[in-house]
Image (cartoon, helix red, strand yellow):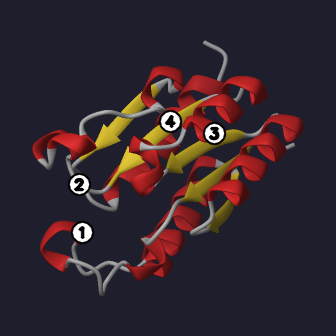
Amino acid sequence: MKQTIFVLNGPNLNMLGKREPGIYGAVTLDDIEAMCRTEAEALGCKIDFRQSNHEGDLVSWIQEAGEQKALVLINPAAYTHTSIALHDAIRAASVTLVEVHLSNIHARESFRHHSYVSSLAKGVICGFGADGYLMGLRALIKLATPQ
């Protein structure tokens, strides 16, 4: 059975390609999904790619991933810095998770330097644009593969 990875995307990521291209680039979320699907096929896994502007959706999806024993690659977007609910959902679901950000959140405004997700993540990838998603998928498969 193929390993499933939930690729979860938070608020405003549906606006990629239009929103602040100087920070986020010209790539769209559809482009990132296509890249992730190609990479998942090469890695022999399947992805469930989702985006929501609603915190509760992300919480429910993390819980669903836990029930399915799926891995999680998440770009929580602005909820990174504000959501104790995401933190609690990740902890409760006991999912293996990698956090990803298109921009380097540590080189931006000081309010973006704190993450409620990072302390529960196996790793954090930021600043590599859309390629960070591919790095995250590879990292999750490596983490899930017995050594």
Q: Residue 31's quadrant in the figure?
A: bottom left
Q: What's the residue type where badge 3 is placed?
A: Ala
Q: What's the residue type where badge 4 is placed?
A: Val
Q: Where is residue 115 in the image (x, y as percent from the top left)?
A: 38, 34
Q: How crowded is mark 4: few (under 14 residues within 10 Å), some or many (20 or more)?
A: many
CB atoms of marks 2 and 4 within 8 Å: no
Quarter the C terminus occupies: top right
Q: Earlier in the sequence, mark 3 or mark 2?
A: 3
**Residue tagged by mark 2?**
103
Q: Distance between the residues labelled 3 and 4?
A: 17 Å
Checking the image for residue 98, the label placed there is 4
Q: Earlier in the sequence, mark 3 or mark 4?
A: 3
**Can see residue 47?**
no
Q: Position of residue 142 (x, y in %)?
A: 54, 28
Q: Distance between the residues labelled 1 and 4?
A: 19 Å
Q: What's the residue type where badge 1 is placed?
A: Tyr
Q: Residue at x 23, y 54 (%)?
A: 103
Q: Earlier in the sequence, mark 2 or mark 1?
A: 1
Where disc 1 sits, the SS reads: helix
Q: How crowded is mark 1: few (under 14 residues within 10 Å), some or many (20 or more)?
A: many
Of the pair 83 and 17, the residue shown nearer to us: 83
Q: Which residue is drawn at 70% across and 29% down?
A: 95
Name the residue at the top extreme. 147
Of the pair 146 and 7, the residue shown nearer to us: 7
Where disc 3 sits, the SS reads: helix
Q: Is residue 2 left or right of residue 37?
A: right
Q: Residues within 10 Å of mark 3 (few under 14, many from 20)?
A: some
Of the pair 77 and 37, the residue shown nearer to us: 77
**Residue tagged by mark 1?**
24
Checking the image for residue 85, the label placed there is 3
Q: What's the residue type where badge 2 is placed?
A: Ser
Q: Where is residue 122 in the image (x, y as percent from the top left)?
A: 49, 23
